[in-house]
Amino acid sequence: TSSMGSYIAQAQASIRDIVERIVASEKSEVRFSLVAYRDHPPQDNTWVTKVFPFTGSVSLMRSNLDQLSAHGGGD
């Protein structure tokens, strides 16, 4: 929900930092994946989990992460 926006933003920032630190410290190819979760009312038939496939591209991982946002709520 929208009230979770600041927490989601902080989680995104932490994940970005973790990704950057892993890439900087590893001496081999690193791949990342992201699984997003959200709850929704029973009448909403959109996704509950969304899987972003593994990628070796940090910019694609960042882009996937940036797609996530908080909105709605009020239940």
Image (spheres, rainbow, N blue to C red):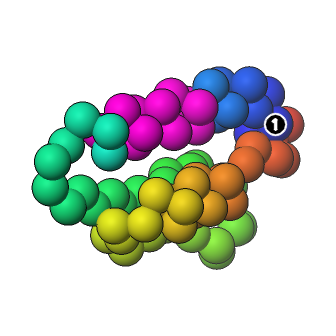
Residue 7 point in image, percent of width and height: 65, 25
Foreground residue, 25 or 49? 25
**Position of 29 compared to 18: left or right?**
left
Residue 57 point in image, percent of width and height: 43, 66
| Residue shown at the point (32%, 39%) measured from the top left | 24
In the image, is residue 29 above or below residue 53? above
Amino acid type of disc 1? Ser
Magenta stretch bounds: 11-22
In the image, is residue 18 above or below residue 54? above
The answer to if 46 sits in the magenta stretch is no
The answer to if 13 sits in the magenta stretch is yes
In the picture, the quarter occupied by the N terminus is: top right
What is the count of numbered marks? 1
Location of mark 1 (residue): 2
| Residue shown at the point (51%, 39%) measured from the top left | 16
SS for callout 1: helix
- The quadrant in which residue 31 appears is bottom left
Foreground residue, 1 or 67? 67
